[in-house]
Image (cartoon, coloured by chain):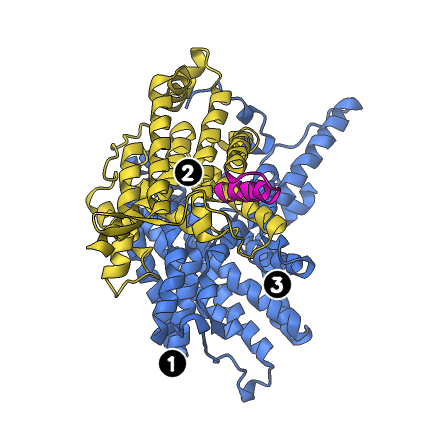
Chain colours: A yellow, B blue
């Protein structure tokens, strides 16, 4: 039982990382209708930026805040100067652009910091506490709680502020938003910036565990995409639920199903996807989209 | 320049041209050094993989990030068959068939969602494939990989190994390119194009988008399997590293850079895949990834049709300057209509042509 609880909490922690990336992907998709395959790569860049400021002697929390601010700017600039040109064109081309961006960002990290694993300090103590007789690591708990808090803040931003209203208007209908005088371009930059911020937070939270490499989040990106498919592209809540479920499920399967084990646990969400795509193609929580000619 | 283009369109000119190319390809390996032959062989290997990717992505418009998985699958099946003493034709058929069946199963599930879902599902293939290949060590040799020699030149031929391999790859690759050419120019090619342009319109014309996507993906997987067979013929060794995520991205980049929706572009893509990493590795291995990203984005911005569209773009620019000069000197020679010299050009690009000029795309006042 103790192992079980430990596994569930660890799973929720990794699941919350996937959830943050998945939310970033949904955010971008809602605003611009494309899937940003570079979301993980940009998050890795953010973690490297935080690493640089830590190396310069700044306190970790300050380094992370600087990295988050820079990530926001980077995300906004990417939207303005790279993505905008392809936004209303062919979605496949835009996807290839984000793949090019992923390669470019990974390449930049590789040139600046090399392929060797770099240690990243943890924001949370590496001790454990006892809950219900199970030993649970503080880092896992704190990671999960941090991401939940950030999601609540994001939800408030979208539902309770004027900026959030404008962002939702642009996502819903860019043409009408433009007619009602909203600065659509700038709002899209804000949307991309927010997504990059979410990614940055996921990046710095997971970096101590995975150690920094240019391809650190390639696998996490795949999990996040799985969560997006399972939760449905139109449902942020669905993505968070799916990401947490994937995190917990893969942890349990890795330990309790020896045939799969730790090396093949990434196949779990995709086995799930295959079943669900056959039964419920719009995702668990998604709406069916009616395409008009 | 127009006269040249007109001559090039004559059927007999094309037949003679094709014959000359064929003769050159057959004679070349006898004259070239071994290293050159090996490079050409690798270009052939990856050109077939890129060609398959082009069928599903360039022609049908479904982003596929997992093509390298099928190349690796074909390579592993080939190694297994060769090491178990199967007939080589059977090995080839098995490499194509296994890749095709797996591709069919993946497509049956992935194609149920909209276009981008295929990209999101197929990105998992290499990421799942690497640990899977390590795990199934009795078939794959685990992390160590597996080697199989079956392309040593037989004694009667009097050829060196690299020349023999060249002819094997040439034979399979030429067949693959001819088959793909017929496919995309025929009934199925038109169905692919219809699905890419507009699924609702395709459905209204009685073309099932779902079936077409599944078909294109399956064919792409079969080409991937054939490419895996050739890979083993050329390299004689495969390991989980063969089907890594990075290679899958490179394959996609090669396809776009060579020219999406173009048969000749696939060959250019294969050449890009072999040459550019070789070049950047020689300078600094850390530069490989960044140069690939930069080249891919530069091509998307400046040359959305890929390298294969370069002559066309150059001609168009030349025409523009001609026309401008004509205006400025008061002569009345108008520029010839755009179609005349665009012989043999693929009629569609996955990239809107306006992106080439790309002023209007920056403003976003127009509704969806």
Residue B262: give x, y in percent of width and height. Answer: 51, 49
Out of A10 and A61, give the one closest to the viewer: A61
Q: Which residues are magenta?
A: A43-60
State whether residue A205 appears in this view.
yes
Pick the front one: B35 or A71: A71
Single out the residue that lies furthest toward the top. Answer: A180
Residue denoted by label 1? B87
Q: Are marks 1 and 2 in contact (CB under 8 Å)?
A: no
Q: How many numbered marks have been drawn onto this rendered protein structure?
A: 3
Q: Residue under label 2, please give it.
A: A35
Vertical placement of residue B63 versus B142, above or below: above
Residue occupied by mark 3: B21
Distance between mark 1 and mark 3 Cα atoms: 31 Å
Report x, y in % for residue A53: 58, 40
Q: Quadrant of the C terminus of chain B?
A: top left
Disc 1 or disc 3, which is closer to the eye? 1
Instruction: Name the one closer to the observer, B321 or A107.
Output: A107
Residues at marks 3 and 2 touching, judged by CB atoms closer than 8 Å: no
Protein chain holding label 2 = A
């Amino acid at each position: 039982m103790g192992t079980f609880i430990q596994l569930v909490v660890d799973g929720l922690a990794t699941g919350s990382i996937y959830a943050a990336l998945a939310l970033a992907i949904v955010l971008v998709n809602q605003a611009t209708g494309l899937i940003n395959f570079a979301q993980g790569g940009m998050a890795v860049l953010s973690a490297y930026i935080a690493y640089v400021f830590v190396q310069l002697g700044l306190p970790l929390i300050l380094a992370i805040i600087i990295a988050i601010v820079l990530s926001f700017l980077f995300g906004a600039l990417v939207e303005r100067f790279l993505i905008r040109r392809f936004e209303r064109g062919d979605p496949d081309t835009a996807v290839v652009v984000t793949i090019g961006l992923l390669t470019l960002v990974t390449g930049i990290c590789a040139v600046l910091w090399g392929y060797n694993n770099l240690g990243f300090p943890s924001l949370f103590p590496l001790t454990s506490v006892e809950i219900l007789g199970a030993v649970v690591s503080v880092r896992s708990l704190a990671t999960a709680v941090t991401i939940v808090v950030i999601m609540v803040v994001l939800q408030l931003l979208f539902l309770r502020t004027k900026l959030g209203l404008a962002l939702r208007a642009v996502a819903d209908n860019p043409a009408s938003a433009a007619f009602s005088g909203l600065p659509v371009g700038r709002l899209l930059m804000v949307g991309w910036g927010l997504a990059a911020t979410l990614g940055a937070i996921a990046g710095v939270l997971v970096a101590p565990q995975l150690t920094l490499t240019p391809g650190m989040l390639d696998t996490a990106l795949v999990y996040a995409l799985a969560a997006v498919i399972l939760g449905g592209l139109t449902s942020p809540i669905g993505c968070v639920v799916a990401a947490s479920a994937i995190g917990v499920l893969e942890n349990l399967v890795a330990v309790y199903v020896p045939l799969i084990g730790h090396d093949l646990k990434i196949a779990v969400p995709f086995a799930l996807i295959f079943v669900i795509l056959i039964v419920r193609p719009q995702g668990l929580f998604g709406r069916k989209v009616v395409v008009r000619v | 320049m127009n006269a040249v283009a007109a001559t090039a369109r004559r059927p007999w000119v094309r037949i003679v041209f094709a014959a000359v190319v064929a003769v050159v390809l057959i004679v070349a390996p006898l004259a070239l050094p071994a290293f050159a032959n090996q490079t050409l062989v690798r270009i052939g290997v990856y050109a077939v993989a890129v060609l398959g990717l082009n069928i599903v992505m360039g022609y049908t418009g479904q982003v596929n990030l997992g093509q390298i998985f099928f190349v690796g699958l074909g390579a592993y099946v080939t190694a297994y068959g060769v090491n178990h003493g199967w007939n080589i034709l059977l090995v080839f058929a098995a490499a194509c068939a296994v890749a095709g069946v797996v591709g069919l199963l993946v497509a049956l599930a992935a194609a149920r969602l909209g276009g981008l879902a295929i990209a999101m599902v197929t990105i998992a293939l290499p990421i799942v494939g690497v640990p899977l290949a390590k795990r199934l060590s009795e078939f794959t040799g685990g992390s160590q990989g597996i080697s199989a020699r079956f392309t040593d030149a037989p004694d009667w031929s009097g050829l060196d190994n690299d020349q023999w391999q060249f002819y094997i790859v040439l034979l399979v690759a030429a067949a693959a390119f001819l088959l793909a050419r017929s496919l995309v120019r025929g009934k199925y090619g038109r169905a692919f194009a219809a699905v890419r342009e507009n699924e609702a319109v395709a459905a209204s014309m009685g073309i099932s988008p779902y079936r077409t996507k599944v078909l294109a993906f399956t064919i792409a997987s079969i080409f991937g399997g054939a490419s895996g067979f050739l890979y083993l013929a050329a390299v004689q060794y495969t390991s989980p590293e063969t089907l890594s995520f990075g290679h899958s991205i490179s394959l996609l980049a090669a396809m776009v850079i060579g020219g999406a929706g173009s048969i000749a572009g696939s060959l250019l893509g294969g050449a890009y895949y072999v040459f550019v990493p070789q070049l950047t590795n020689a300078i600094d291995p850390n530069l490989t990834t960044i140069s690939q990203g930069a080249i891919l984005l530069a091509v998307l911005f400046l040359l959305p049709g890929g390298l294969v569209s370069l002559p066309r773009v150059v001609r168009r620019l030349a025409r523009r300057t001609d026309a401008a000069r004509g205006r400025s000197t008061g002569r009345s020679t108008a520029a010839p209509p755009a179609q005349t010299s665009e012989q043999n050009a693929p009629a569609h690009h996955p990239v809107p042509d306006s992106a080439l000029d790309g002023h209007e795309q920056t403003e976003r006042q127009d509704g969806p």
